[in-house]
Image (tube, helix red, strand yellow):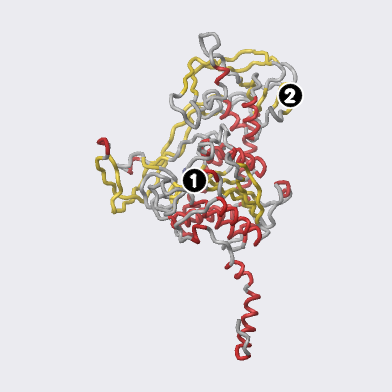
Amino acid sequence: MRTTDSHGPRYLLSAVLCVSLAGVAAAQNAPRTVAEKSGFTATSRYADVMAFIAELQRLSPRVRLEPMATSAEGREVPLLVIGDPAPASPADLRGDDRAVVYFQADIHAGEVEGKEAAQMLARDLALGKTATNYLDRLVILVAPIFNPDGNEKISTENRRNQRGPDQGVGERYNGQSLDLNRDGMKLETPEVRGLVGVLNRWDPAFFLDSHTHNGSYHQEPVTWVWGLNPNGDSTILAWASNVLFPAITARMRDAYGILTVPHGDFVDPRDPAKGWIPLGPEPHYLSNYVGLRNRISVLNEQYPYVDFETRVRGAYAVFLAFLDYLHEHRDEVVSLVRGADKRAIARGLAAGGAFTVATDTQAIAQRLMIRGYEMEVTVGPGGRPRARPTERKRTYENVPYLARFAPARTVPYPRGYLIPVADDRVIENLLAHGIVVERLLAPAKLTVEGFRVTEITGDRRPNQGHYMTAVKGESATAEREFPAGTLFVPTAQVLGPLAAALLEPESDDGLLVWNFFDRYLAPQFGGGAQPYPVYKLHVPANLVTERVTGP
Ligand SMILES: [Zn+2]
């Protein structure tokens, strides 16, 4: 520091500037992520993320840390509650019109772009460095490292097809060797259970799950798609496709200079014009699961063949583009999800057969444009054709996009489901989702629809630790006596559509598929399978029940 008289006036001026620029100085001391510090050659480890969060908390009261789960290997999964002020709990938000939104990253811990971008986002929100002050209307939940156990298995051998980071990335699976993005219905991982706890406690109107893809060649560095399950609220589904999609596409292009295309892959990589398909609509994918809970839901996938810095910046920009939209349209978004809740309840109250639930789906094409490449087809190993992009860019117009999943088969939506077997695992699963479950206090004689299983098959290959069960059968209506203690799951509740997807016998992603009912179906003395132990009530009935709070 200069103290000579000749420099006195300058020194004084500097001192004044130092005071007035204190905010800038704090921003300059702002923590940098491992990706930023390493020149985008490395990604953060769990300890780096936790130290980064601790530093943010030291610098800003806007960030509160809430553990959302303990991973299989014993790591606390951090949830950042970012607000101005940061609410101490969901109860703190009563009488507060801020909307809660949720961003999640690193679910597949080889796909680390979102983890770096989520830390950048948390920092920039905490230190007031974003161009828009989102925190006057939003409380922003950020789960930057959703799969810490997979993250800690960083190796340069993982995801070698993508461009960096040079120092390696983590693994796809969690500490139980399970894929967290297949656990939306069965809830067998502590991380997804933690997420569902956050959904139940904080009820975010919006959910985004950040990934990096591993598929077709195109020019757009960022892709995303909304929750696709057709049993979700049809108003939200149409709004996501017709309103949100064009708005975010324009915002990404115009404000952030980044091209996007809906998430997908070419049906035939040799001929991109044939079609573009997203992931399936099954709710074991978390983006579809949250959509089935009637919340606005986004799967975001970065493009793996651009460099790591471009991917991190793409992930960051997509966070901001959605925040821009949510901030500007908060009231519309909140009324959309509140309306969906009312419609879900009304659907359950409507008398027998007015509504249906889809147990199978078919994709209907919309049209879109993809900026791709001309493809070169060569003969790969085993004589199989292999398609590689050439240097020649080519725009494919009017490509069929198979993202609107219409019901291919439907069954009547009931007033409720009766389950005479009080199975602890079933009760525990339903309650973990946040579904209201009741128990009959007295026997009841009711006319119900039952499902007689005529054929039962198990998959020959395991999937997520399961040999998945499939059944065929027929429904029949009959009077039946249900003993006291029988479970009753009313569909006139916010999570009615989710309950139906879990309990319908022919649901393509229900508890039957995931083996929860196998023991009840197996023939006891040879002969045919036992009836499915879940019955559908289609007519109003005066049931004397109590709320079930645990197995
Ligand atoms: Zn992924």
The spot of residue 364 in percent (x, y) is 43, 36
Query: Tag 1: residue type?
Result: Lys
Query: Tag 2: residue type?
Result: Thr
With 417 as the anchor, is 88 left or right in this view? right
Q: Residues within 10 Å of mark 1 (few under 14, many from 20)?
A: some
Q: Residues within 10 Å of mark 2 (few under 14, many from 20)?
A: some
Residue hosting label 1: 153
Residue hosting label 2: 545
Q: Return the disc, 2 or 1, that comes first in the chain's sequence.
A: 1
The residue drawn where x is 65% and y is 56% is 63
The spot of residue 330 in percent (x, y) is 61, 51
Disc 2 secondary structure class:
strand
Q: Is residue 70 visible?
A: yes
- Quadrant location of residue 429? top right
The residue drawn where x is 52% and y is 35% is 284
Mark 2 to mark 1 CA distance (whole Å): 49 Å
Would you say the beta carbon of the disc 1 residue lies within 8 angstroms of ligand 1?
A: no
The spot of residue 135 in percent (x, y) is 64, 57
Above or below, 533 relative to 169: above
